[in-house]
Amino acid sequence: MKKIRLLLGFLVLLSFSSCVDIEEHYDFKADGSCNVVYGFDMSKAVSVLMNLMSDSVRETPQFALKKDTSLNFYSALPDSTQLKMSPDEINMAKGSMLNVKMDLQKNVMKVSINHLAKNAADLQYYLQHISKISMSSNQLSAVSKSTKSSGFDAQELVAGQDYYSYDISPHKFYRIIDKVKFNAFLKKTQSTLAMAKAMLIDMPYKVVLNFAKPVKKVSNSKAIVSADKKHVTLITNMDEVIKNPSVMNLKIDF
């Protein structure tokens, strides 16, 4: 059992340290609201690690788990964290949903966080505080009692998003990577990132922004703007970001 927990713990560490397909989706509505979805697909990392395990370990009940569940993000926080939260942070967490789809035998492990921001100020608050809430906790509770034995720890889910600074208004979305915070993140996870590279685990990163009207200006030359100028897509990977963190900078006027 201890061996299983160690393997699952390693899986979570590997996956949430950027060895995962990450997709951010922003859907800006005409009324000023914005639906934000952080999607984390750890299936590739699961596939690699499952191949390293013995048949006896893969056949244990823990690896036979199949889950497709959703719950309120606030409910995934331990009481100790909830008691330290401000009213605004509580409302933010209660307004976010956590979704988990898991089938380890089929190499499936997908997690997403969904939040509807009412306006630009709400969106900026959410992006600046969601990771701080998770990191202020010593250990988030498991997604639910039924998924606790999977080793899933929601605390790690958004921790890596804490290296951005935002400037958002009803007509602009600016996100700049904080190189000091990003370098600290790299230092903390350098051994895991090196291991992932050695295991040939890819680390793609995709950002998709959909707008209700055409955008006026996009600063990032790597960003792809659709013909109708209502959709902006940025595709990169962790290797590229490590070499040039500014590749993640986005300044969009709309």
Image (cartoon, rainbow, N blue to C red):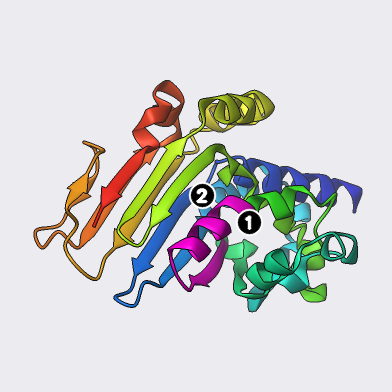
Residue where numbered disc 2 is placed: 44
Residue numbers of the magenta segment: 109-130
Q: In the image, residue 99 lies at what x, y percent?
A: 59, 71
Q: Is residue 124 magenta?
A: yes
Specify the quadrant of the image occupied by residue 254: bottom left
Q: Is residue 41 magenta?
A: no
Q: State the SS at label 2.
A: helix
Residue drawn at 81 percent across, 52 percent down: 137
Q: Closer to the camera, 7 or 180? A: 180
| Labels 1 and 2: the sequence-earlier one | 2
Residue drawn at 46 percent across, 65 percent down: 36
Q: In the image, residue 38 lies at what x, y percent?
A: 50, 59
Q: Is residue 14 left or right of residue 244?
A: right
Residue drawn at 19 percent across, 68 percent down: 213
Q: In the image, residue 250 lies at what x, y percent?
A: 34, 42
Q: Is residue 187 left or right of residue 177?
A: right
Q: State the SS at label 1.
A: helix
**Residue kind at label 2, given as amino acid type:** Lys
Residue drawn at 63 percent across, 62 percent down: 104
Observer-side mark, 1 or 2, equals 1
Residue where numbered disc 1 is placed: 130
